[in-house]
Each structure stands twice: as C-alpha cells, then as structure tokens.
Image: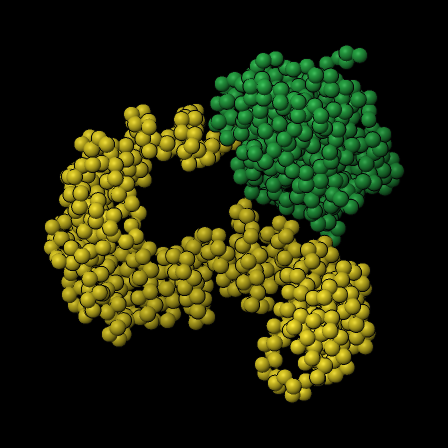
C-alpha cells in the first residue's frame, strides 16, 4: 500500500466512526472543515495549512491525520514529520500521534528519524506492545524485513508481545520461506483474533506444494484448534484439495459453533463445485442441527457430485425430514433425479407422479425420466415418454435418441441445434462431422452402451463401426482408445493409437494418438519408445498445438535419465 | 588485464579472422528475444561439438548467438527441442560478419566439448543444484564427482568443475542448529564422517579442507572452476584457513581458533581477502564475504537486481563470454552465499555483475595459476527465496531464464579454441 493509500484507508476507517459522531459543523472546528473541503478539491498544500490551524482546536487527531494525508499527497511528508515530532513531545502518551510521527518519517525516507521516534515512543510507553507492533507493521509494508525482524525480536522483553506480534512474525517468516514457522505464528495470531483468518489464509496460500505439508502439520497439531482448522480448510480449498479441506474440519467436536463453521465451509465448497465435500459438511451439520433444508442441500450436493445412491439414502433414511409443502416438493424432485441417474425409470416415474409441479418443472423432470429409460436400454419408452415435447426439444434429447437409433442425419442436426452442448455431445458431434453416412446402427449402439455405462460394449461397437464408417474410423478408434485407457485397458488403447498413427498418419487424430502413446509408454517404463513417439509428433506435425506437450514428455524423460 | 587473459584475447581476435569453413551453409542460433529456448540452445551447441563439428560463439551479436554447421542432425534436434534457428547461406554469413566487424562484437571458435565434472553428493537430487538442473535440461553430459573421486584422482581428466552449496569448512553449512534432528541431515553427517575416516582424516573439516586444496591445485594447473552459492565462500575460507582451526566444536571437537581471522593466509585464496569469520555456531553465516547474510537473524538484506557489465568482445573475450545474455538486468536470488562484499574482493578480480549502489557484487571472475575461476552468488536464479526442501525448479517453465544463461555461459566457455599466437 502506498503512503497515500494507507492514509486514505485510515480516513475511511475514521469516516466510518464519524457516522456515530455529531454532524459536520456541530462542534467541529471551522479550520478542520475548511481543510477537508480544500482536500476534496485537490488543493493539498492549502488543505495542509488549514489542518495545521485545526491542530489547536479540540479536533487534534482528525486534524493531524488530515494534515499527514494532505502533505503526503503533496509529496511533503517531511513537513508532516516535523509537526508530528513536536506534537509527540507534547503528547507522548497519545498513540495516534506517535504512529503518525513514525509513519511520516518513513514516508519521508528518513529511516533514522523513524527509528529514533520509535525509541522515544517505547520510552514513553513502557511495557506496551503497541510501539513495536505499529513500527514493525510499517517496516513490513516498506519491505524492510530485516529491520521489522529486529523490532519484533526487541519486543520479546515486553510481556504478551510474543502473542500480540504473532501475525507480524508470521509475515516475516513467510517472506523468508520458513512456512512451518509462519504457520505456527499465523495459528497463534488467528487464535488471538478471528479477523486475521483472511490475512492468514492469503499469506499461507502462497506457499509452494513442497512446503504445504509443514503448514498442514503446524495447523493440525494438538491441541485441536477450531480456528486453525478453519484456516487449514480455507487453504486446502485454495490449493484445490477440497477433500483435504473437509478432513481438516470433520474431526472438530460437534457443537453449535462447529456446526456454524461446517455450514460456512459447505457454502464455500458448493461455490467451488466441490460437491462431495459439501455433502459431507451438510451431513455433519445435520448431526447437530436436524433441519430439512440441510438435508436437501446434502442430497442435492450428492446428486451433483455423481453419487445418486447416497442422495437417495439421505432423502429416505434421515430423521431430519423437510417440513412444509414446498420443501417436500423439492425432496420429491431430488428423488426423481436420483432414480433417473441410477437408471431406474419405473421408480423415477412413480416419484414424479406424486408431485405437484408447474409445466416447466414437469418438463425438466420428465426429461430426466426419459434419460432413465435410455440408461435402462429402452429408447422406445424414452421417446414415448417425451411424446410431443420431443419435436420442440432444444436440450439435445431428440438428437441423442436419434443417435441411439442409428439415425445419424437427425442426430447431427438436432445435436447441433441444442443450446450449449455437453462434453459428450461435443464428442458425438466430432464423430458425426467426420462421416457422411446417414445411418449406422453400430454407432448408435455404441453411444447407447456408453449412456448405460457399459464401456466394454461401447468400445466393441465403436471399433466395429470404424469398419463401416471408414471416413470416421480414426475418430472412432481414438474415442475407443480413450475409453479403454480410462477403464484401465492401456494395452488395448496402445494398440488402437498405434493403428491410428500407422494407418491414418495425416488424420486430425494422429498427433493426439502420438502424444497419448508417448505418455502411455512412459508410464509403463518404456522411455525409449516414449521418446520416439514424442519426437515423431514434433517432427511430423511441427505446427500442432500438441508440440509443447510432446516437448514436456521429452523433458520428463531427460530429467529421469 | 592479466597475462593469460591478454593472450587469450589476442588468440581470439586472430581466430575470428579465419572463417571456419568457407562456402558452407550455416545455422544461426539467435540468442536475443527471438530465441524460443535459450537454455536448450546451449545444449545444441554442445551437441555440435560432441559430433566433432565446429561452432562459433558470436559475442555480443544478437544476445551472444551461435553459428553452427547446417547438418540434418542439428536441424532435427533444434526442431525437437523448440530452438529457434535461422539457416544462412554464404551471403548471409558474410552479412553477419560484416555487421560484426564494425561493432563491439567478435566470433569465438568453439572446437571441443569440455569434460565436465559436477562436485555433488552421490545421492543428491539434481534439483538441489542449479547447475545440474541446467545441464540436464539443456542435454549436456556431465559426471558427478564427490570426495571419493577428488581424493583418488584429484579431478584429473576434467576441463571444468562445478561446485554448488558445499561447505568446505566442514561445518555442513551450520545446518546442525536448525536441521540437526532431521533424518537427511544425520545421514549427511554420517556419510561425510565415514568418508573422512576412510581417507585417514580425523573429522569432516579436515577432509573438506583437503578436498578444497585439491580443487585449488586443479585450478592452479589450468582447470576451469565455476562455483555458486555457499561453495564460493567456504572454498575460499577453507583454502585461506588451511592451517587454522576455523570449524566449530560440534564439527571437529575444538572451538574456532580465537585468532583465526589474523591467521588466515589470503595469499592462497583466489577471489577474497581480509574477510572476518562468523565463529558462532548459532549464526548461519560463515563470514562477512556474503553481503546478504541470509541466515544471520536481523542482518538479512533484501533482494534487489543485478546488472551485467559490458566488455570489449575483441580484447576481453573471456569476460564477454561469461556475460552473454539477452537481458542486462536480472532479479537477484538468495543462497547460503548470495553476493560478495566489495571490501573483501582481491585487487584484479573482474566484476561481471553487481547491484548498483550496493556494497556487494554478484558475479566475479579471475585467473589463478594457469586456470581461471568464476563465482556466482545465490542458489537458484528462478527460485529467489530458495530454502531447504523447496520444490524443484521446473526449467521447462523458464526456457528463457537469463540467470540460468550465466551458468551455461560458463559451461561453454572452456570449449573456446586456444591456439598459439602467430606473433
């Protein structure tokens, strides 16, 4: 923060206090008002003169701060120091005057004067930590770590200083890369003041991956501290480890304060789309506060996290059932979606039947039930359920159902017309765009098997379709290889990638297959094979966007040699 | 300028007049901002020499570019590594030479890939040493040597030796206070003690002093030494303090000689003089050679930036080679020894880079006997706050690192051709 900005922040803080004070003009000196008006107009030198005049009124502190501000804006902090210096001699016990004295000396680039002012302030306030804390903070802001460190070290003789100056010490340790020490001191600091949590999280969040275990161990060490755990949860979320974030909080003693911390965490986890940690947090809250709303949020998080089975268990098995018609309708809708996600169309249909919904809500849930029929393998029933709505569908359902039946022409058109396509739709469109064929039952069967979660059948069907749809063969084999690799059949995937590279060297999939081959070979310890593939990619497709990634593979190989 | 440097300057000035092979097609490897991967460009040049081909280092021309023969193997390697190259026909080469002739530029022939040794513990990970990181990334071969090899062979057969943060005073960087209870430190100490006893030394300080002495002789007899971080300072302390007890009691069983400062023989040292030892075992620094005092509580100085000096390429080619870079001002970085105080530099030491107005310099060079040495303060140019346990620097993220270029300048410098004067 610059000097002016720092002063401005003090003003804002004072401004906030002023709302409770008498209105301007009632008991405020005329000189002070004039100073503020001049300052507002940017006439800083004149404003400083007015504020100096106001120093003789009862508005000493606001006038002093105004004067410091105006001089700083005019680049005359040295003048502010002269005034503050003489005021400090007259009012040695006045903390704000001492702060302005030290601060204006530092802003005027007079470190020796600042140090001397600090020493006098310490003498004037024996046994107090404030001089050390304020001076150390100013030095830290100026980036003078070594000097700040010396001030903190000197403060150790003052009772209570170790605890009070923990945050300042932590900042110094962090800037030196001593993250374990910084974490220990931030822990002490947040235990003293909860308001320091964001500052601690921001400071420790900068630690590199290799230093994070030291921070974790400092914040998790006994005795259990809810604030330290909250700090660690914040950090883990920032570091992209939401599961670890929840682990930090999960073992806290369950009481109302903890439930509040858990709720706050669940909200943040939802915002970060970390659905399973959010669900776990809501479940924990339910153990303390049996509220239907928490139950619904837990079930919803579970569904969005891809675990419909637990969502159902929560909805049907919890003692904290939602009260009121509105909440019961929400619970019913969640139940429909959970059954649909599990591929249980009959149960989803039954759950849907009992709900009172408007047309839009019913259409959305009906589409979910249709998907349930698809997942159960009955495309006909899905189409029947959608009925007339299918003709107007813009969500992609019509395209998918056509694709499952092998009607590539309709699928191509309908999927393209759907709003924002999903990842699956993009994958399907990429394949459809590669062939001019209008029908392919084998391709439809492949995608249907995928929708049902039957990867083995899907792979077999896609590989079979590659024979019929020669123009889309490399795209189909690339998709099949990806599916094989995702399900642990790396050898099968390698065979397919090799086929693509050898038989369709000029295809769009070939560089991707080369890179995938290089990575797979490296993962199984064949560095020479991996190197050959990566080099082949770079030399054969020099303008491919994958070249940097191929070079990355080569760097990995070189660093392991 | 010393006699050796003057001779080298004249040799290079004459060599530049002789084209390496007239009529050949060439690859220009630009080293200015157009280069996509500066660090791997050094590896490409090194690879050229390994193939038995000749190269030229165009000092001060577009950031210190290289001129290589146009052969398929080099084109392939440049493509794979993402190194920018510009094919030149004879006319293009002539134009480059013409542009250079009227400027502070010169062409230095590079003829032989130097044999490189990196002094480092056998089990040290490569990322703990910026030089091994740079060599690995650039694809330059080296041999790891440590106390066994130095004691047995005395570094014979190597052109270039690198030292990093070894503590040649034998006090293991005074890490005992902070890391004494950690497993890695205890193993480090046990391994070093075992080696000391195997070679008949009473303790680690005695072993390390002997290793330092053998390194000193390596340079004296014509070797090139490049040292970084704590090795710079402690090597010199070990050499100057060869006959003085400069190690703390925990290291050798006896306290530091109270008159150690007065007994140091700085005439034996390469770079420094009249330094004062920090005898306390509780203070992490070794002496007042380091300007930044990173491990001395309350004395640490903030990092600034250092500026590379310019040298006359035709008359001072050695210094010129060492400072070739595409930027001149580089952010500073900490190490056990970060910088070198001006007051402790010997007269005649060439300052290659310093921080303007600061009482310290960053990068120095000098001759010693028939050889020469270069010292660069700091641990890792791309990890300015490096501490023990820091994550390894991924050089793939810093392919244009100007700090790492300084390290690689030192690697290629011994490849420069030397031949008898014509006069």
Above or below, B184 relative to A259: above
Q: Looking at the image, which is closer to me, A552 or B318?
A: B318
**Is residue B8 shown left or right of residue A234?**
right
Q: Colour of chain B?
A: green
Query: Image quadrant of residue B341?
Result: top right
Image quadrant where one finds the C terminus of chain B? top right
**Looking at the figure, which quarter contains the N terminus of chain B?**
top right
Residue B69 seen by the camera: no
The coloring applied to the image is by chain
- Which residue is rendered at x = 80% and y = 63% of the image? A113
Considering only vertical position in the picture, is A518 above or below A255? Answer: above
Give the drawing colour for chain A: yellow
A379 or A331: nearer the viewer:
A379
Work out whether residue B258 can be spotted: yes
Image mark count: 0
Residue at position x 61%, y 43% from top?
A: B383
* Residue A92, horizontal then vertical, whole percent: 78, 75
Q: Nearer the viewer, residue A199 or A497?
A: A497
Whole-percent x and y of residue B345?
81, 36
Left or right: residue B176 versus residue B41 is: right
Residue A62, compared with residue B310, is above or below; it is below
Q: Quadrant of residue B393?
A: top right
- The location of residue A230, given as percent across then percent down, is 49, 62
């Amino acid at each position: 923060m610059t000097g002016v900005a720092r002063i401005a922040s003090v003003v804002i803080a004072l401004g906030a206090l002023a709302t409770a004070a008498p209105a301007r003009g009632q008991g405020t000196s005329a000189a002070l008002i004039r100073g503020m008006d001049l300052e507002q107009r940017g006439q800083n030198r004149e404003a400083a003169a007015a504020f100096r005049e106001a120093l003789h009124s009862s508005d000493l502190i606001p006038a002093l701060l105004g004067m410091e501000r105006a001089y700083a804006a005019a680049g005359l902090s040295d003048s502010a120091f002269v005034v503050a210096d003489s005021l400090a001699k007259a009012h040695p016990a006045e903390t704000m005057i001492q702060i302005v004295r030290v601060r204006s000396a530092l802003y005027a680039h007079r470190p020796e004067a600042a140090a001397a002012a600090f020493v006098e302030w310490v003498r004037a306030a024996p046994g107090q930590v404030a001089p050390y804390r304020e001076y150390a903070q100013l030095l830290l802001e100026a980036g003078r770590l070594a000097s700040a460190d010396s001030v903190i070290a000197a403060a150790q003789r003052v009772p209570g200083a170790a605890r009070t100056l923990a945050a300042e010490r932590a900042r110094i340790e962090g800037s030196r890369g001593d993250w374990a020490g910084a974490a220990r001191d931030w822990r002490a600091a947040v235990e003293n003041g909860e308001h320091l949590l964001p500052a601690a999280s921001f400071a420790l969040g900068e630690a590199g991956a290799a230093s994070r275990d030291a921070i974790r161990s400092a914040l998790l060490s006994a005795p259990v501290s809810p604030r330290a755990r909250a700090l660690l949860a914040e950090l883990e979320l920032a570091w992209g480890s939401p599961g670890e974030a929840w682990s930090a909080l999960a073992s806290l003693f369950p009481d109302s304060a903890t439930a509040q911390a858990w709720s706050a965490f669940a909200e943040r986890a939802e915002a970060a789309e970390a659905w399973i940690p959010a669900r776990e947090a809501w479940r924990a809250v339910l153990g303390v506060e049996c509220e239907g709303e928490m139950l619904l949020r837990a079930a919803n998080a579970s569904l969005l996290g891809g675990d419909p089975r637990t969502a159902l268990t929560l909805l049907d098995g919890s003692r904290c059932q939602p009260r009121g018609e509105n909440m019961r309708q929400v619970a019913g809708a969640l139940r429909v979606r959970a059954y649909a996600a599990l591929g249980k169309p009959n149960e989803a249909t039954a759950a849907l039947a009992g709900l009172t919904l408007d047309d839009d809500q019913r259409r959305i849930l009906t589409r979910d039930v249709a998907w349930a029929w698809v997942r159960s393998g009955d495309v006909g029933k899905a189409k029947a359920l959608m009925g007339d709505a299918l003709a107007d569908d813009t969500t992609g359902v019509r395209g998918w159902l056509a694709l499952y039946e092998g009607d590539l022409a309709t699928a191509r058109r309908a999927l393209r017309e759907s709003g924002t396509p999903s990842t699956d739709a993009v994958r399907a469109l990429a394949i459809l765009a590669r062939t001019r064929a209008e029908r392919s039952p084998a391709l439809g069967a492949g995608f249907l098997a995928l929708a049902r979660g039957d990867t083995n059948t899907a792979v077999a069907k896609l590989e079979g379709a590659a024979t019929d749809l020669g123009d889309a063969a490399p795209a189909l084999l690339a998709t099949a290889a990806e599916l094989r690799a995702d399900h642990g059949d790396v050898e099968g995937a390698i065979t397919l990638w090799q086929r693509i590279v050898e038989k369709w060297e000029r295809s769009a999939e070939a560089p991707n297959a080369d890179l995938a081959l290089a990575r797979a070979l490296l993962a199984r310890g064949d560095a020479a094979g991996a190197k050959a593939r990566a080099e082949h990619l770079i030399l054969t497709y020099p303008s491919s966007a994958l070249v940097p990634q191929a070079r990355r593979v080569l760097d990995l190989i070189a660093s392991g040699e | 300028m010393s006699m050796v440097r003057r001779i080298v300057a004249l040799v290079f000035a004459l060599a530049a007049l002789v084209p390496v092979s007239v009529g050949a097609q060439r690859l220009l490897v630009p080293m200015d901002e157009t280069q996509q991967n500066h660090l791997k460009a050094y590896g490409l040049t090194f690879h050229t020499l390994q193939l038995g081909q000749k190269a030229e280092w165009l000092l001060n021309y577009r950031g210190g570019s290289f001129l290589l023969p146009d052969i398929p193997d080099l084109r392939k390697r440049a493509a794979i590594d993402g190194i920018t190259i510009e094919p030149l026909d004879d006319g293009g080469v002539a134009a480059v030479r013409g542009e250079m002739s009227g400027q502070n530029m010169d062409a230095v022939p590079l003829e032989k890939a130097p044999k490189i040794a990196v002094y480092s513990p056998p089990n040290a990970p490569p990322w703990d040493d910026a030089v091994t990181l740079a060599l690995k990334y650039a694809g330059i071969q080296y041999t790891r040597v440590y106390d066994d090899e130095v004691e047995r062979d005395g570094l014979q057969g190597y052109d270039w030796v690198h030292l990093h943060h070894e503590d040649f005073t034998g006090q293991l960087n005074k890490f005992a206070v902070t890391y004494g209870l950690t497993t890695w430190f205890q193993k480090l100490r046990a391994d070093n003690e075992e080696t000391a006893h195997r070679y008949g030394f009473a303790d680690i300080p005695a072993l390390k002093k002997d290793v330092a002495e053998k390194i000193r002789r390596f340079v004296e007899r014509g070797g090139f030494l490049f040292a970084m971080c704590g090795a710079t300072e402690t090597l010199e302390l070990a050499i100057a303090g060869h006959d003085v007890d400069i190690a703390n009691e925990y290291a050798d069983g006896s306290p530091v000689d109270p008159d150690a400062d007065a007994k140091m023989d700085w005439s034996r040292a390469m770079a420094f003089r009249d330094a004062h030892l920090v005898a306390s075992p509780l203070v992490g620094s070794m002496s007042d050679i380091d300007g930044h005092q990173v491990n001395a509580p309350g004395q640490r100085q903030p990092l600034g930036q250092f500026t590379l000096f310019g040298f006359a390429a035709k008359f001072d080619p050695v210094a010129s080679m060492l400072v070739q870079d595409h930027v001149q001002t580089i952010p500073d970085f900490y190490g056990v020894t970060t910088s070198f105080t001006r007051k402790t530099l010997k007269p005649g030491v060439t300052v290659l880079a310093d921080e303007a107005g600061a009482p310290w310099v960053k990068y120095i060079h000098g001759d010693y006997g028939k050889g020469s040495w270069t010292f660069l303060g700091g641990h890792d140019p791309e990890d300015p706050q490096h501490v023990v346990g820091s994550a390894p620097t991924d050089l793939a993220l810093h392919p244009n690192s100007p700090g790492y270029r300084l390290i690689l300048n030192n690697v290629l410098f011994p490849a420069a051709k030397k031949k008898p004067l014509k006069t």
